[in-house]
Amino acid sequence: MMAESQEDARIGTIRSLLEIALERNATMAQVAIAWSLGKERVRALVINAPATDQLLNALGGIDLVLTAAEIQYLEEPYNSQMLRH
């Protein structure tokens, strides 16, 4: 079973994704893709989209560039959780 602090970190990250998506008039998938593509170690993404329109929508994240503040906001719940261990 996942530790409560890990679950809290995941929920916090999801909330951050939603907030940024709403501010940017984007979907959560687009923000997640933009965030992932901004990571130096990410070489490829696997997108599970059962329908063509979902895939095309998600691919909109390729053109989205997050600010340093947005990236920090997305990573804050995760980093806080990691620092406790």
Image: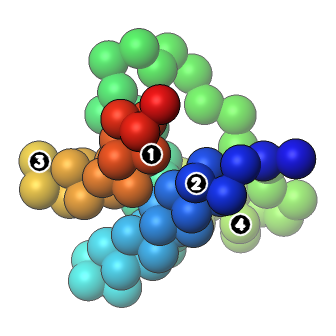
Q: What is the tally of numbered marks visible in this picture? A: 4
Front tag of 4 and 1 = 1
Reading the image, the residue beneath label 2 is 5
* Pointers 1 and 3 in contact (C-beta within 8 Å): no
Give SS at disc 1: helix
- In the rendered view, does 36 fall on the left or right side of 69? right
1 or 2: tag closer to the N-terminus: 2
Answer yes or no: is residue 55 visible.
yes
Distance of label 1 from label 3 (alpha carbons): 20 Å
2 or 4: tag closer to the N-terminus: 2
Distance of label 2 from label 4 (alpha carbons): 32 Å
* Pointers 3 and 2 in contact (C-beta within 8 Å): no
4 or 1: tag closer to the N-terminus: 4
* Pointers 1 and 2 in contact (C-beta within 8 Å): yes
4 or 3: tag closer to the N-terminus: 4
Residues packed near mark 4 inside 10 Å, few (<14), some (14 to 19) or many (20 plus): few
Distance of label 4 from label 3 (alpha carbons): 27 Å
Reading the image, the residue beneath label 3 is 68
Distance of label 3 from label 2 (alpha carbons): 25 Å
Marking on residue 81: 1
| Furthest-front residue in this view | 85
